[in-house]
Amino acid sequence: MPTQLAIVNGRAPVTAMPSTPAPTTQTTGGMVDVSVTANGGRIAGLHAPSGLPPTALTTLDAEGYTVLPGFVDVHIHGSDGVDVMDASPAGLATLASFLATHGVTSFLATTMTAPHDAIRNAVAAVATYMANPSAGARILGVHVEGPYISPHFPGAQPASLIRPPNLTEFAELLAAGPVRMITLAPEAPGAHALIRAAVAVGITVALGHTNASYEECQAASALGVRQATHTYNAMRGLHHREPGALGAVLSNDALYAQLIADFVHVHPAGIQILARCKGVERMVLITDAMRAAGLGPGDYELGGQPVKVADGECRLADGVLAGSILTMDQALRNFIAATGLSLAEAWPVSSRTPAHSIGFGAEVGTLTPGAYADLVLLDARLQVVATVVAGEIVYLRDAERKTQTMMTA
């Protein structure tokens, strides 16, 4: 029987695979010639071009393209007119389809500070969608950002709705749907109990929107906090006599550092500093995108608050940044530009590291046989030309590169 999909004659980072496909494969600049086959939604094999796979039902010519594990966005509120807080399965389908056009194959639908029922409804809508998903990026679950954050660093979260950690509310969110991550301020009264409860059931806990001291962050890390939400933004900064939350993130190897690499939230030099401190194995590119992403400048809404989008920035009426209109492919291009790393060096920040940061490293973010066949093809300008989710082509820029084989009984 033929394989379901073969992506032939591409190039991939050596470090994206468990081993090179064959001893004779040509390796240059950290990249290797490779063809990838998929069956049953999983990667079936990696092949050197000289040992092309047998006939496939669908073949995608990747000549001149780079094959990477699909992008994984663990912090995104919306795009293309959709917000996760709309609590609409149909809206989530629109979002999943849009993200695939920018190389995203998996993401966490992210909520924000709101009344408890509104957050619970959003989580429940994700559960409904995941039971019957459409073509597009795969939702891995929900990232609950807030409401248990610091009023000193609300960012664009509605400050009037911030409240102390509540175990009863948290249990109701878990019952409503697949919560996979929660962002909270670890210094808030009751935060330690919630951290323990979340860690006990395998939920990733991130510190964010926090006024925590260096010592408070280290104590939270000891309890199991493993990630920092949009590093630099909405957290106590670094001082040489009080390192603050930022100092804890920069110096604690147990903490993954999320980064909005849009050159608005963080200066390119800040990106370079973070990369030098954390390395690509502890940096997680995110978009923190809101519903205006993919649309144009104008007036939008986030958490019931008016947002003006202009000159690539999203701001509340008081000038506070309110998410972004960033996409993951642009984030990777920006990261490479800021750090000077090559694609072969930088690629993990957009897929492998995010996947590992939320416990999905064996399933997504890798070109390992048996993992999900979630792939993105990039051209020489690092523009997305094709996106594959579970072995199905969900976005294709150049249709002539795809061929199909008709099978007869």
Image: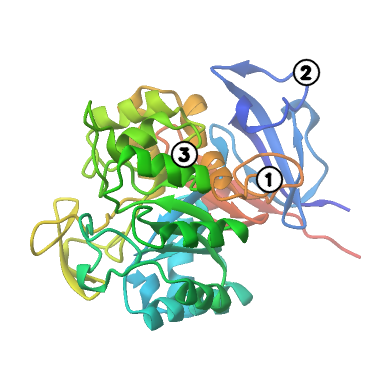
Position of 210 compared to 264: left or right?
right
Which numbered disc covers residue 23? 2
Separation of marks 1 and 3 at Cα, in angstroms = 19 Å
Select label 3 or label 2 by which is in front.
3
Separation of marks 2 and 1 at Cα, in angstroms = 25 Å
The quadrant where residue 31 appears: top right
Residue drawn where x is 38% and y is 79% of the image = 116
Q: Residue furthest left?
A: 318
Mark sitting earlier along the chain (3/2): 2
Mark sitting earlier along the chain (2/1): 2
Label 1, secondary structure: give it.
Answer: loop
Which numbered disc covers residue 262? none
Kind of residue at disc 3: Leu
In this picture, is 119 found above or below 320?
A: below
Mark 1 Cα within 10 Å, few/some/many (few <14, many 20+)? Answer: some
Residue drawn where x is 44% and y is 47% of the image = 220
Position of 408 compared to 128: left or right?
right
Kind of residue at disc 1: Ala
Q: Which residue is mark 3?
A: 255
Residue 228 can be seen, yes or no: yes
Mark sitting earlier along the chain (1/3): 3
Q: Which residue is mark 1?
A: 362
Task: Decide which of 245, 104 is in the foreground and name it.
Answer: 245
Q: Quadrant of the C terminus?
A: bottom right
